[in-house]
Amino acid sequence: MEGVIDIKRLKQFSLNTIYFKVIMTILIMTTPLILLLIYSNTYASNVVRNQVADSYDNMMALYMNQIDNNLENTISYIHNVVALDSNFLTMEQTNSDKNYSTAKILMANELKQKIIMHPIVDSFFIYNSQRKDMLDIYNSRPHYDEMIRINNYFSKFLDESTSYKSNNWTPHYIDGKYYLIYFVNREGTYFGSWINLEKLQIPEKLVDFGGEGGTLFISDKGDAMTNKALSEKNNLLLQEFKRNDKQIFDDKHVLISEPSEMGGFSLVSIIPNNEILENIPFLQRMSILIFLSSIIVIPISFMILRKIVLIPLYRLVEAMKQIQNNNLKFRIKKNKTSDEYKLVYDTFNKMLTQIEQLKIEVYEEQINKQHEELQRLQLQINPHFFMNSLNILYSLAKLRDYELIKKMTLSLIRYFQFMFRDNLTFVELEDEINHTKNYLHIQELRYPKNFNYNIYVPDDLMNTPVPPLVIQTFIENSIKHAMTLDEKLQISIEVNHCEVNFRPYMKIVISDTGRGFSEDVLSVINQNESIMNKKGEHIGIWNVSRRLCLLYGNKAKISFRNNNTSGALVEILIPLD
């Protein structure tokens, strides 16, 4: 929020920060009052701590006794149901699905009425290991994900622990939380209950433990089972705790433990010394006196310094962090502040504007360079085929086959009309396919009955923009390197929709029945390296790969491999979004 200082961030600064100096100034002003309070606290703390510890101990014993009584009542109810309840016995003994379902419904209705009498219980459950069936009734239904995790845990635990006997309430760790579980196993049918340990914590409104104190449950080994934040703050203190210890004192806290008689856990209270000392009347009067004297000096001085120095400074610090995150559009808003800060803000905003403009100019220059490279790559293709075309016409003229020369010339006119457009960055797929067909027609005139081809393209992809010559280049390679006079060459072009990482793509597959790529060539072209030889051959493959990279970045993919039978296969993936 604008104008609000993040104190936690400022605390991370070095000792030379303005924030630190302001705090130190305030501390120096208030040190005499604080020293007086410390002296008074030291004088009375040893007497008060023991008295307060006894008071908390009695309160916790009463609370734990109440928990144990509820746990014991729940155990008694579970045993009564297992021993006497006819519906449970039917669920355990019957082989009839109908009788089992009826007993299950009656049992569910009964548990819904009885669970209200056990307020600390989260759920009663009945699990039939033979049927793999779970019935669970809740006091208050937990979150669906939590319910599924607990049921899955119970099912697996009970299936794997057929000989396990639950003699008392035992803590179980399930997905980051501890639960108390008690159950009875009767011939593979389990009846029990589970309680979220966090539900048994002493309510904060019942006892005020201060900002650094609180209660938590720990296991017999001293591991914290609830209130993880409190346990992490007091990890060293808890490591010294043993189950039989009732009270532990250190310089900052009093730890009071009350073990449960119904399970392997204990309730522990951690009470800060400052909370204990607030109960002394004399210290209360001293605190009031100190508060009255400091309520005028400290807030006023801090508010003035905060408004004049810290808030404007933090705005500038926040702006610096935005620059670190490459957010050059960020500007410091105009606020009421001192002239010095106004000058800094204005200079900073002007500097950001200049940097942003410079970055745009650099970016445009890079785009122009890429565009120039793309044009060079496209022009690189034209002379290559142009020379081949002249050779074809020359050969036909020597044979004086004027009809064939007419057909060839007409096809070449169409070919070069496509090649010499003003803008060849993208063409529609339909134009690229027609151009490829025209090229194949030229080659049919040159090599009659030496190859066949088939083309499949869905109608809804015909208007899709694609880079020019992305298909024709590989058809040219097939005819040049795969066609022989001994065996008829089959060329296939197939275009389809596909999905890669949940994004729509157009997949173009070009294959032939020639001898395929050599292993050396495959290893080079799949690494996107050029294999142009001294005669300028093989430049087309690298040319297409480079143009796809310039136009689509890393979104377009091209891969090369050999078919399982024979021939080369090229697969091109072009994003449709």
Image: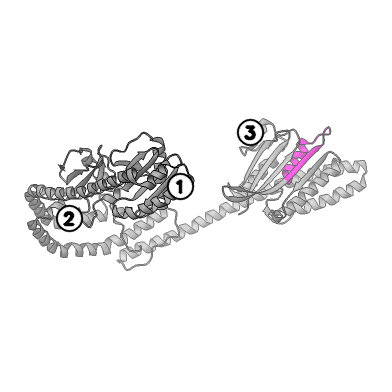
Q: Which residue is rendered at x = 93% and y = 43% of the image?
A: 400
Q: Residues within 10 Å of mark 3 (few under 14, many from 20)?
A: some
The percent position of residue 28, horizontal first and vertical second, equals 15, 55
Query: 198 or 504, which lies in front?
Result: 198
Quarter where residue 173 is shown: top left
Q: Residue at x 89, y 43 (%)?
A: 396
Query: Which residue position is annotated with label 2?
Result: 27
Q: CA distance from mark 1 to mark 2?
A: 77 Å
Q: CA distance from mark 1 to mark 3?
A: 70 Å
Residue at the spot of label 3: 523
Q: Secondary structure at mark 3?
A: helix
Mark 2 and mark 3 in contact (Cβ < 8 Å)? no
Residue 3 or residue 180, whichever sits in front:
180
Colour setup of the view? one colour
- Residue 310 rendering spot, x and y as whole percentages: 28, 60
Image location of residue 2, percent across then percent down: 35, 63
Judged from the image, the secondary structure of the residue bearing numbered disc 1 is helix
Q: Amino acid at mark 3?
A: Ser
* Residue to which mark 1 is pinned: 99
Q: Is residue 232 left or right of residue 146?
A: left
- Label 1 is placed on what type of residue? Asn
Counting residues from the start of the chain, the first of labels 1 and 3 encountered is: 1
- Above or below for 192 versus 428: above
